[in-house]
Amino acid sequence: MSESRSGGAEPGSEEFQDSLFQKDADRVYGELLARVGEAAPRPRLAPTRRAVELLGDPQRSYPIVHITGTNGKTSTSRMIESILRAYGLRTGLMTSPHLVRVNERIVIDGRPISNEALVANWEDIRPYLEMVDAELREADEEPLTFFEALTVLAFASFADAPVDVAVIEVGMGGEWDSTNVGDGQVAVFTPIALDHTARLGRTVAEIARTKSGIVKPAAAVVSASQSAEALAELQRAAGLSEASLAVEGSGFSLLGTTVAVGGQLIDVQGVAGRYEGLFLPLYGDHQAHNAAVAIAAVESFLGAGTRPLDPEVLAEGLATATSPGRLQLIGTEPTILVDAAHNPHGASALAQAIECYFHFDRVVCVLGVLGDKDAAGIVAALEPVVECFVVTKSSSERAVAPETLAEVVARIAGADRVSVEPSSGEAIEQARELAEESPRGAVLVTGSITLVGEAMGLALDGGWKG
């Protein structure tokens, strides 16, 4: 997907100033893309650690809230950041992957890093990255990967800003993820399920063991409700690190949620306080649970879990939280929603949210899945709320061929409920036509983060009303 965005920004405005550095920002992104991609992470920490050491360990210049899990990492990260910013702290936020622009991955004080700052920080760190690349080649190892270099860039950018606290989302796993060169004062775990099994482990316990590697000595550990096998691994890691552990259900809990216009009202019993009637502008019970985890994480960070949060500040932080690409409206007439669900667990949460929060009489799903994902599990989770599927593929090299994906859909939902359109843009147009046949029809684009990003890019380019 293109990194460039044209626009009619007024001369002298921030948008116009930022546009002056667009070509340089595109060059930086191109240099990152020239490295080994995120689809093939290297289970190693030494190269990233060497790079940040050469830079003077920028990741040690601010406290860190470190987040891992299988689903809900980005939404929970964004809620934590939003609450901390409501408290007046200058925040850094690193999430992945991006949907439209790479700047989205490095957020400073609630805004994606400017092209100017992105380029300036890259130029500052590039000589040191090249030094590490040379050392790695001399040792017959691969140079720094895309994500390793990006992690160094994020840590350096936050130190340059500077920020008061950084909320860092793990790229994959935990123990050997390059973000783990930072030491989180709070380690946060969203629900852990099977995903990336070829790299993280074949069982939930093995995956949880890898993810538990972000727990550092004397840290505060906050976890969503977990399966028995995942929880056992987190308890083991916390015990070995002499870390505290607060788990949803016993240490804190979601007391209730009520559907509201534009989202939901939630009641939460936190680690230190009880909070009622909080407006959350996100849909789905899973987002309410994510919010409970976020509140417990902020309580653990600000007051070591001993002081309740200020109700008004908390309400402001949650009410202004956003999570792009997560059940997000990007078009109207008909309604077009995108959701980044890319595994069965995420697809089940999506299906439940569609049923509870919307009243569509027909849902047409534009579906694209990557090759290392459980396509059958995703389709089985969505099938009860979807009338028909238009299968397609994103621009990712890992995307499953539409014809192959159509066979999976036909086997589960029936051949009469699936059609094929290789172009994602044309697939959305076809889905719009099908949805418009019903008074309350809707289009749902899901199954792949890259597909969702392309849909959002089309919407930004004026593809649909909304």
Image (cartoon, helix red, strand yellow):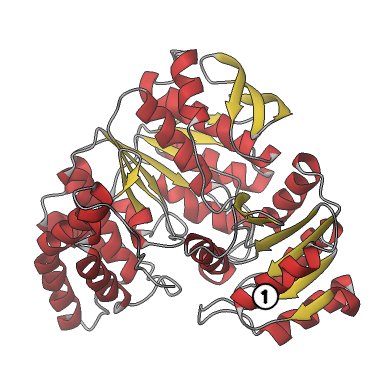
Is residue 340 at all visible to an observer of this figure?
Answer: yes
Mark 1, residue position: 427
Is residue 245 at all visible to an observer of this figure?
Answer: no
**Residue type at the position of mark 1:** Ala
**Residue 308, position in %: x, y?**
47, 13
The image quarter in which residue 273 lies: top right
Q: Is residue 438 left or right of residue 263?
A: right
> How many marks on residues?
1
Residue in front for this viewpoint, 294 or 90? 90
Residue in front for this viewpoint, 5 or 370? 5
- Residue at the (52%, 45%) spot, across then down: 323
- Residue at the (23%, 37%) spot, across then down: 163
Q: Is residue 12 left or right of residue 372?
A: left
- Mark 1 is surrounded, within 10 Å at the Cα level, by few (under 14), some (14 to 19) or many (20 or more) other residues, namely many
Q: Is residue 423 left or right of residue 166?
A: right
The image quarter in which residue 262 lies: top right
- Residue at the (41%, 55%) spot, across then down: 175
Q: Secondary structure at mark 1?
A: helix
**Residue 278, position in %: x, y?**
59, 22
Classify the position of the N terminus by image quarter. Answer: bottom left
Q: From what the image shows, is residue 322 above or below residue 319? A: below
Q: From what the image shows, is residue 307 above or below residue 36? A: above
**Residue 17, position in %: x, y?**
20, 54
Q: From what the image shows, is residue 274 above or below residue 299? A: above
**Residue 84, position in %: x, y?**
38, 29
